[in-house]
Amino acid sequence: MTAAVEFACVSRHFGPVTAPIKAVDGVDLTIAEGAFFAMLGPSGSGKTTCLRLISGFETPTSGQIRIFGQDVSQTPPHLRNVNTVFQDYALFPHMNVRDNVAYGLMVKGMGRAARYGRADEMLSLVKLDEYGDRKPGQLSGGQRQRVALARALVNEPRVLLLDEPLGALDLKLREAMQDELKALQKRLGITFVFVTHDQHEALSMADSLAVFNDGRIAQIGTPEQIYAQPRTRFVADFVGSSNVLPPAMTAALGGPAKWASLRPESMYLSASGPISGTVTALRYLGSGTRVVLRVGEADVAALVPTGAPVPQIGSASAFAFAPGALHVMEGE
Amino acid sequence: MLSDRPSALLKISAMAGLLFLHLPILLIFLYAFTTEERTYAFPPPGLTTEWFAAAWARPDIWEALSLSLRVAFIATLLAMILGTLVSAAMSRAKFFGREQISLLILLPIALPGVITGISLRSAFGIMDIPFSTLTIILGHATFCIVIVYNNAVARFRRLSGGVMEASADLGANAFQTFWHILLPNLGTALLAGGMLAFALSFDEVIVTTFTAGQQATLPIWMLEELIRPRQRPVTNVVAMVVFGATVLPILLAYYLTRNGSETAGAGK
Ligand SMILES: Nc1ncnc2c1ncn2[C@@H]1O[C@H](COP(=O)(O)OP(=O)(O)OP(=O)(O)O)[C@@H](O)[C@H]1O
Ligand SMILES: [Mg+2]
């Protein structure tokens, strides 16, 4: 099976050659056909630039991009079978919703009746049957988001790019849309490339994900791999509320002298240690209580499930962790 | 507690201000119908419509009117083409000296008319261009471009680059994007800019005085006519025409941009 999207050492630099801004820097990437692929990373890490490289609005400074095995370096955006749901939706303000959705078919020369029929199908797919005659300005944020989705899907792209499509929505709507998007992707079998800086969103929705940092991929893998076996401190920090242990501490806990990560939920109270210190903070989270322990120079957080006894702030306390929970990281 | 209702004093002074501004216009209309030919005696001794016929029969008025219309039309057309192109370039490209050029484009409207007039006059003189309809048109085009440019640039700014990328993303080529996305969004702004430019050109006096040879546009004709105490109410009839030809486009432009800004803002 050919990959949907492949990056071969792709870079995109902006600004002067002497002091370039390395928005994307030597990225290798393979996105399988039909996958729900997430790009996760902090602001400015190059996620949008990567999407724009796929859609054709940026050209790589170096490296090669292939879409379904075909080199697209010479293909302008309007000839790529890739569609985008833009972060700000970019709906056409002077057209009603139906014309917005039918736009991709219109520019291909499809007749009015046929394209309106297709547009209405797409609108019912995103549950907006009644809204065809409205202008985008008369819709709520969530509704606009769905119109943008319907408009991008009407061309039956083989790859759909979504740039933080849920960023502008409130939490409840966001969660509802996450489920809908995931279901839609499964149903249509289209490859989704989904950009987000919300780690929960990336972990819960993606089949596979790439963590970006400073224009480079810090780690790529399944959500389970990224969560349980972060390769670097950056990934461990960014992806979860995990403890990052310095080499000395890892060594003291029986590992090699390297940075390691330790999940708070894998720790439990145990009088014999091996991690002991003073409790400095408690945070009740509903399903449990997060206990922050001062161990020498470092802070270590542990999750005590609700129902179990919780130590007092200021008291000395000791924790043990499940065997195998200490993950030693390969990178820095 | 402060009342929302304006005080009587405020109302009266506002009324007085409005009357002061607009009564003279009404007077112009009134004197177009007076039977007194030499002085503007108030109240007019009698009312008549004979001056309309008199104006109709005067070839010099027709000449001036036709010149004014021609100049306004061509200057506006020129301004719409050049103004749109410049605004497109300014809002899409980033290049060295962009700010400076934008200032240069805006300058003619800020410059006093006499300066524009004198500089154009000496430029035409140096280049040995004889004064003609063409020189008037060029003079008017300098400030008409600014009007169109300003309107178009404001609309370009509101039209986020996103929608044009969205259009290309959905498979539209450059021409389709221009036709289906850019033009409908720019259309009312261009029309409004064009109408304002037309109105400005139609009643322009200062630059015209410097760039016209023996020809008289309608406003210049009126200025000359006021000095001669002959058939005075004819001037008033012409003033009514000028009023109609300038006020209507400006009002229309106002309504067009008002609606335009509503739809454009709603898309955000
Ligand atoms: N056209 C450009 N010119 C110069 N620098 C750019 C350009 N586009 C992006 N950059 C820079 O490249 C870097 C990556 O930008 P990018 O938009 O890809 O980040 P991002 O990961 O999408 O961030 P966010 O989460 O904030 O959207 C940033 O430092 C940005 O300033
Ligand atoms: Mg971005």
Image (cartoon, rainbow, N blue to C red):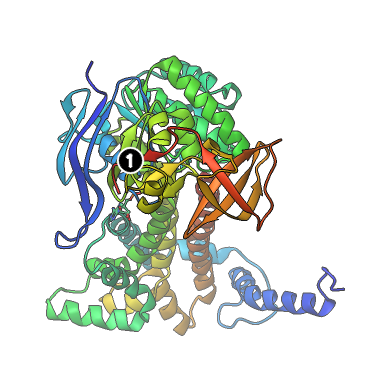
Q: Is residue A82 left or right of residue B13?
A: left
- Within 10 angstroms of label 1, few (less than 14), some, or many (20 or more) residues? many
From this view, report whether residue B190 is shown above or below residue A224.
Answer: below
User: Residue A16 at x, y = what percent?
Assistant: 17, 61
Q: In this view, does A177 lie to the left or right of A58?
A: right
Q: In this rendering, does residue A255 appear at all?
A: yes
**What number of labels is visible?**
1
Q: Please give the chain letter of the residue carrying mark 1.
A: A
> Residue extending furthest front?
A272
User: Residue A66 at x, y = what percent?
Assistant: 19, 29
**Residue drawn at (43%, 35%) of the image:** A227
User: Residue A191 at x, y = what percent?
Assistant: 35, 23
Q: In this rendering, does residue A96 appear at all?
A: no
Between A103 and A19, the one nearer to me in the picture: A19
Q: Mark 1 points at which residue?
A: A231
Disc 1 element: loop
> Residue extending furthest right?
B1
From this view, report whether residue A98 is shown above or below residue A44.
Answer: above
Q: In which quarter of the image is the N terminus of chain A?
A: top left
Q: Which amino acid does label 1 sit on?
A: Arg
Q: Is residue A35 left or right of residue A62?
A: right
User: Residue A112 at x, y = what percent?
Assistant: 42, 19
Between A245 and B77, the one nearer to me in the picture: A245
Q: In this view, does A193 lie to the left or right of A272?
A: left
What is the quadrant of residue A157 in the picture? Answer: top left
**Residue drawn at (40%, 48%) of the image:** A252
Ligand 1 lies under 8 Å from the Cβ of mark 1: no
Between A256 and A200, the one nearer to me in the picture: A256
**Residue drawn at (51%, 44%) of the image:** B267
